[in-house]
Amino acid sequence: MSKTIGIAGLGWLGLPLAQRLQFLGFQVKGTVTQLEKATALQKKGFNAYPLTLTERGIQGSTDAFLKDIETLIIMIPPGLRRGTGADYVLKMTYFLEAIEASEIQHCIFISSTSVYGDAQQKVNEGDIPKPDTEAGRQLLQVEQLFFNASFTTSIVRFGGLLGGSRQPVRYLAGREGLNNGDAPVNLIHREDCIGILIKIIKQQAFGHIFNAVHPEHPSKKTYYVQKAKELGLEPPSYSEENDTTFKEVHSVNIPNILQYRFQKAL
């Protein structure tokens, strides 16, 4: 059995995942959107290919990248900007056609908890998503496309991402009158993202949906004020409005199917 893993999107998460997989003995191929980035990564020993998805098709070394891959991990976010009309579903349909024409057997599609609406309250993988944003709606459509493809796909819905220089509280520091402070956070550390993806690959746990969110859900007000203090930032303040709108994302599949235990505290 081939041990070649493909990662479409060698970025903030994809690159450290590639490093970890190589350390574990897997052959890894990956994509970036710019030729210069691909060249720089190749010099560092990564098997990187330039590849860009557009609404007119795929630009780059599609066939060369997909060749000999057994499991493909797709980390290409919608990146929708308000009013741009970007068609993520169309871009991913082109990519899906290329993947189905290859010999890839398994896929892990990285999605987001944005497929659940902000008022869905407590949800797990058994609940039907009701997205209330354009990005969430397009992600859900692409999930369904890949879930019904000729290869077997697992969907991983990550919560808000933490780790390295990425700390959401930096964008909130010093802000006043923020809304919905009693709503729970839905977050996950990059180390746990990597741990969950490696578990799926090692266990060949394909054909499932995984809500990848840390099981602890402190309120936004409690969490972000505390984090700001820890980082020496001015804490944000929240309005006293008692808004009952919230989304709290849980998983039954991560503990039951993967038996994964979260490694990093929030």
Image (tube, rainbow, N blue to C red):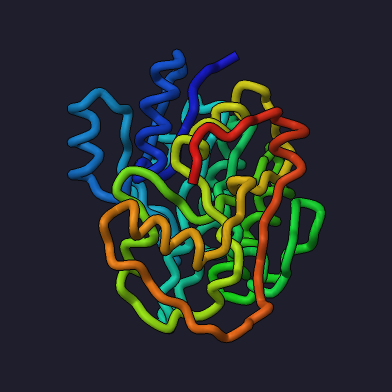
Instruction: Kindly indicate the quadrant of the structure image that contains residue 243.
Output: bottom right
Total marks in image: 0
In the image shown, does 146 or 18 lie closer to the viewer?
18
**Image location (x, y in percent) of residue 182:** 59, 71
Residue depicted at 63% across the width and 76% down the height:
132
Which quadrant holds residue 255? top right
Q: x%, y% of residue 146?
A: 66, 49
Q: Looking at the rendering, which quadrant does residue 19 occupy?
A: top left
Looking at the image, which is closer to me, 235 or 81?
235
Write the residue at 62% across / 31% down.
261
Q: Residue at x 30, y 73 (%)?
A: 174
The quarter of the image holding the N terminus is top right
> Where residue 32 sits in the image (x, y, percent)?
32, 45
- Residue 152 visible in the current orientation: no
Please tell me which residue is depicted at 49% across the width and 83% down the height of the picture. 239
Can residue 178 be seen here? Answer: yes
> Against 87, is 25 above or below?
above
Residue 235 percent across, percent down from the top left: 35, 67
Q: On screen, 185 above or below 256?
A: below
Q: Where 193 falls versus 29 (above or below)?
A: below
